[in-house]
Image (cartoon, rainbow, N blue to C red):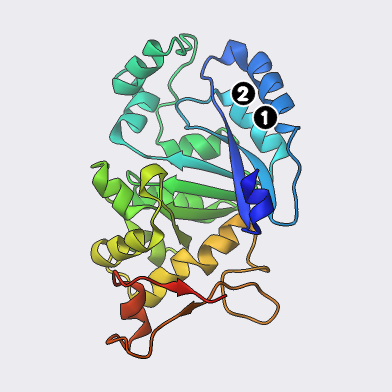
Amino acid sequence: RHLEDSGIYSAIFHTVAGFRQYRVYDTWRQRWEEFKAWTDTQHTRHHLAGEFLFTTAPGLLLEIAKMEHRTALPVAVCREEEHFLNYRNGAIYQYLLSKNDMDYRWRPPQISPIQYLLDSGFAVNDNILSQMIYVTEEDLEILQEYPVDFHLCLHPRFDRVWELGTAPALIMRNKGFNLCLGTFAEHLDLRKEMRSALAEYGFNPEEILEMATINGAVALGFDEQLGSISPGKQARLFSVSHSSAIADPYKLIFSNARLVALQ
């Protein structure tokens, strides 16, 4: 609730999990009752989202798709995800067994995570797909042709720290997707993610700055309020000492220099 009182714009995605299809009704009813307690404010919007494709039952993902216009989902996070969707065994299968959450009646669709997302009708009007490490060019072309918006959120530093792999960011950019920059958990430092993106993806600094600002605002539905320095928008500005040795603003942003917010 501190976000609602802080003046910071935020979109909060309340995740729904539970892979056993026969528990969908009870799981959805409980989660929906909890979700209804939250109301949107001027600065905060609430949405429902699946936890992962492999931890959220198809019935739950369909319920989300029925009522949401914007959602978020990690997709193609690890190689084991596609293996599970094709063979119903491996590390993810063991993980669901360990949680007593495996549905033995579920049959693997034997397709890629992207194809599973689309063929099953889980997509909504605006979809934020995060991670997207193990996707093929064919997967991205399928997303391109689908008649809804997909915003792809990348996390280069987080992915490197956790040894997840590297997303095909250049191909995503060349396909025209709205690329955003995100971070996770104990790694909540977007400037470090920006430096990692500069080193790993081959983008220029201006592209990465857009990923961290206006592109993210578009993905979250706040681009009319923030994300760029424009008349009528809110902006958080930073000052640079005249004694600074850094003259290039991009070098400053991508450096370790401490930025001081203007009051």
Q: Is residue 165 visible?
A: no
Residue 247 point in image, percent of width and height: 32, 89
Q: Is residue 146 visible?
A: yes
Left or right of 247, for residue 35:
right
Quarter of the rendering occupied by the N terminus: top right
Between the C-alphas of marks 1 and 2, the distance is 6 Å
Q: Residues within 10 Å of mark 2 (few under 14, many from 20)?
A: many
Q: In this view of the protein, which residue sits in the foreground, 163 or 262? A: 262
> Which residue occupies 47% across, 31% down?
53
- The residue indicated by pointer 1 is 63
In the image, residue 46 above or below residue 43: above
Residue 46 point in image, percent of width and height: 67, 44
Q: In this view of the protein, which residue sits in the foreground, 188 or 220? A: 188
Q: In this view of the protein, which residue sits in the foreground, 94 or 118? A: 94
Left or right of 155, for residue 31:
right
In the image, residue 54 above or below residue 76: above
Residue type highlighted by circle 2:
Gly
- The residue indicated by pointer 2 is 59
Helix, strand or loop at mark 2: helix
- Residue 204, by quadrant, is bottom left
Left or right of 221, for residue 201:
left
> Which residue occupies 75% across, 33% down?
37
In the image, residue 168 above or below residue 185: below
